Amino acid sequence: MSVERIWQAIAETEALEDIELAKPLVNRSAQSVKTREAINFYTPTFKSFQTSEVSVCGKNAWPAVSITGARCKLQCDHCKAKILEPMIPAETPEALWALANRLIAEEGAQGMLLTGGSNHRNEVEYGPFLETIRRIKDSYPHFRFAVHTALMDHDQARSLEQAGVDVAMMDVIGAQETITQVYHLKRSVEDFEATLEALVATEMKIVPHIVAGLHFGELLGEWNALEMVARHLPDALVLVVVNPIYANPRRPFKTPDPEAVGEYMLELAERLPEDFPLLLGCARPAGEVKTRLDSYAVLAGFSGIAHPADGMVELAVRLGKRVQVTPSCCSITIGEEVLGEETAGFTVDIQRLMEEKGQAPARGRPIPIPVVAAN
């Protein structure tokens, strides 16, 4: 795609009117190897979400559940277990069974993100819950589990597979300094790569995460993490960005530089295979930083963005992409028919939407926005 067309699409997207994108990054994106015709915007329901463009949230379809409630022994500096607090607790196998039955019967849940706080070795202790996960899968074959594994060995990975877990996720950390200083963990970079290797050896879909800015807001081990992913080539990769609001004030994180993260997005696009799914996950800073990050992800050719900033649907379509909206966790839909072109859809007219909200009309020509709503 030409540089001129990219800048025209940016100029015509009203939500980007006051957003200054880095010229070298935008220009470099014209040579990106990711030339996908489609982009998927995900609206998982463990966060409230709506923009002027996307409001199909599939309420209660994909709840986030913690087997430890809000407790985590690790207490990493970037999180302090705050991310667990809004999740639904299910701290015993019996509670998980009862919760799954209620969510399916009363709220139409299609699956869940299952996670929990870690022990001091960065392990989530799923052992007592495996039989219950298997029981739920046997009772409701279409119900899907996306599980955040933390660190584990080959036997533990196979146990998750045998329990019926559909998607396994883990954070890939590439700097020993980050493991020691941020996670306060006596584990090695090699332990993280060994976990990835063990997971990829199973039949589960494996969707690791790389956290940009994990070292107190600076990018440090992200390039090594990329090389680890490239060596083992899982089913997809989710990039998330540290949000400093969760950090301990005594060890503050700065907001990662969106241009540095944008450069890293292009590195991901150029280093990994052309058809490899790259996703921008839920966790990232809000406001203008989010808009810049999301814009760089669209321009880099990411295949999906969770909870997109306002204007991203319009930007994607002005770049000639087909837009899809899926009300689920981005990690669970990789390779599924839910992304098929034959899915029934609807159209959104950006011009009309803005007029209804009393906003100024789009500065470019009015365009109908084809959106595939996958349920």
Image (cartoon, grey):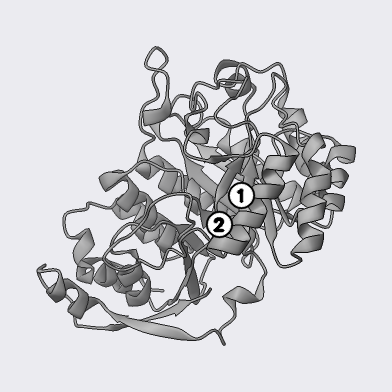
**Horizontal placement of 127 versus 339: left or right?**
right
Residue sitting nearer the eye, 296 or 121: 121
Residue 94 point in image, percent of width and height: 73, 41
Residue position for label 1? 113
Which quadrant of the view contains residue 143? bottom right
**Horizontal placement of 88 versus 167: left or right?**
left
Say whether residue 354 is visible: yes
Residue sitting nearer the eye, 284 or 174: 284
In the rendered image, the vertical position of residue 255 relative to residue 170, given as above or below: above
Residue sitting nearer the eye, 261 or 196: 196
The structure residue drawn at horizontal position 54% and vertical position 84%, both measured from the top left corner, is 343
The structure residue drawn at horizontal position 36% and vertical position 55%, both measured from the top left corner, is 49
Residue 367 point in image, percent of width and height: 26, 83
In the rendered image, the vertical position of residue 270 relative to residue 253, given as above or below: below
Which quadrant of the view contains residue 15? bottom left
Residue position for label 2? 62
Q: Earlier in the sequence, mark 1 or mark 2?
A: 2
Q: Amino acid at mark 2?
A: Trp
**Horizontal placement of 348 versus 157: left or right?**
left
Say what secondary structure mark 2 lies in: loop
**Horizontal placement of 107 versus 53: left or right?**
right
**How many callouts does the rendering have?**
2
Would you call the spot at circle 1 few (<14 residues within 10 Å), some (14-19), or many (20 or more)? many
Q: Amino acid at mark 1?
A: Leu
Label 1 vs label 2: CA separation? 7 Å
The structure residue drawn at horizontal position 53% and vertical position 56%, both measured from the top left corner, is 279
* Marks 1 & 2, CB-CB < 8 Å contact: yes
Say whether residue 362 is visible: no
In the rendered image, the vertical position of residue 202 relative to residue 115, given as above or below: below
Say what secondary structure mark 1 lies in: strand
In the rendered image, the vertical position of residue 218 relative to residue 206, given as above or below: above
